[in-house]
Image (tube, rainbow, N blue to C red):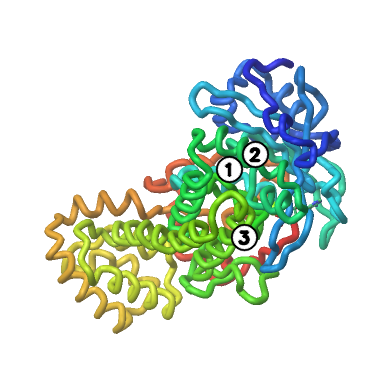
Amino acid sequence: MDIVNFDNSFQKLPEFLYEIVEPTPLKHPKLVHVTELKKELGLLSYTDADILKWLNGELKLIGDQRISTRYAGHQFGVFAGQLGDGRAISLGEILTSTKGRLEIQTKGSGITPFSRMGDGKAVIRSSVREYLCSEAMYGLGIPSSRVLALIIGEDKVYRETVERPAIIARVFPSNIRFGHFEMCYHYNRPSVLNELIEYTRLGFFEGVSIYEMLEQIVEKTAFLIAYWQSVGFCHGVMNTDNMSILGITIDYGPFGFMEDTSLSHVCNHSDDSGRYSYENQPHAAAWNLEKLLVCFSKHVPRENLNKLLLSFSELFHAHYKKLCHSKIGLYKLEPEDDALFGSLLQILSSHSIDYTYFFRQLSNYKIKQLDTISDFWCYYAKSEQLLSWFLLYDQRLERELSDNHKRSMEMKKINPKYVLRNYIAQEVIEDIEKGGKQKLNEWLKVFYSPFEEHAAYESYSKPSTSINQSISVSCSS
Ligand code: AMP
Ligand code: MG
């Protein structure tokens, strides 16, 4: 198999940053799904059988030399030393005509020099969740790594119970994380750090100055977190090794879309202190950026690094505000609008109202006609607090002078009808474990257009039962 425009640019960096590795193929592999990226990556002439063998590690490309990279990171507030790709292997980069350089990395391809105590495997459960969510984020317009294919195997993988393995092929412009810079800085490799900075600056930031690159990283991160907050997405493990330098969502683990609104919602059952709760995500991102910026202390004067760090909060709030105002159909900004949105969030939280469903229903609201969201009241008793909020909202909408129909259309472009609720992922996982492919195919179609109506899936847009919401998601993967 040969691919035109195949490159291995990361391997031109010092060997400190990676190790050459050999993948461990899954036994009796089965290709469950391939996404539309097959076309964008110029792989259409390859059969599914070729793609399966290539991604499973049974077939090599010409010049194919696979690597796992070395990075460090702060995990739950503590410097964890060297981590690295413990089960991910990069196959190289394809230079696409439409999307520039795209790195292909398989996750679950076996032990690497960075596996530590792990087995290098990934189970079906966590792989399907990452697969679905990567594409769901794309559908929502939120920056994220994407996926090319999902493979499952027959080998035994030992977690809390015996499970089966999977490999997903992830696709992103680059795997570079905050942790790669931390690795060079904390292990005192200034020349490797310089090369990594140059590689990143020239390859992914159009050659702007180091300071401007950092400005962009802070901005992209701020925007990403604002997007997450706006759709109620909780990452779950915002350690610095899980933060992309490109401001895209990576390393999906015990993530969750908040269902019953709770500002202190923690999606990861292993996060006892709630460090990465919904409301703490912006703070966690700023904390992580500080750890990244420290690595640039020889390149940028301290006062400028401080300035960059301070800019995060401003950028985050500006973007988040814009998204929030659009979520409630306000486009002329008034000073009280922040308070109006803030008080709504408090009410949703104190009454445990489904986050996604509420905003989608609000998109149908007509001025002074509470019954236009009658569907909503079937789920929630009419709270006095919420009714008072609607009075204020009515007054505010009148000043907006937007007509009901136009506002509704605009609001439905920002308030998704469908998000990846945990129980939906669970239904897909169970189908795949039984040998099915259909649910994955069907749900991907829904998640590629989450702002559209999908009549057959109506019930999944509604608040789910507490049993469905109680599905426990831990770090085990
Ligand atoms: P995560 O919490 O998934 O981001 O993983 C944290 C670190 O543990 C990363 O360095 C991973 O590569 C590594 N890791 C997680 N699971 C495994 C596994 N089953 N085998 C080897 N390394 C793993
Ligand atoms: Mg990780």
Q: What residue type is labelled 3?
A: Lys
Residue 427, visible in the rendered structure: no
Q: Name the mark nearer the viewer: 2 or 3.
A: 3
Give the labeled residue for mark 1.
Answer: 145
Give the foreground label among 1 and 3: 3
* Secondary structure found at label 2: strand
Q: Position of residue 22 (x, y in %)?
A: 85, 33
Q: Are marks 2 and 1 in contact (CB under 8 Å)?
A: yes
Q: Which amino acid does label 1 sit on?
A: Ser
Residue on which disc 2 sits: 170
Q: In this view, does 448 lie to the left or right of 181?
A: left
Locate residue 165 relative to residue 286 in the image: left or right: right
Secondary structure of the residue carrying numbered label 3: helix
Kindly report the distance in space between the C-alpha atoms of the residues bearing marks 1 and 3. Answer: 22 Å
Which corner quadrant of the image does residue 357 belong to? bottom left
Please report whichever mark, 2 or 1, sits nearer to the chain's N-terminal start.
Answer: 1
From this viewpoint, which residue is outermost toward the bottom? 384
Q: Nearer the viewer, residue 363 or 87?
A: 87
Rendered view: 213 above or below 294: above
Q: Distance between the residues labelled 2 and 1?
A: 7 Å
Q: Earlier in the sequence, mark 2 or mark 3?
A: 2
Residue name at image x 82 percent, y 27 percent: 58
Q: Does 370 appear above or below 300?
A: below
Determine crowd level at label 2: few under 14, some 14-19, many 20+ residues with C-alpha closer than 10 A.
many
Q: Could you tell me which secondary element the residue under label 1 belongs to?
A: loop
Residue 291 image label: 3
User: Does residue 55 lie above or below 385 as drawn?
Assistant: above
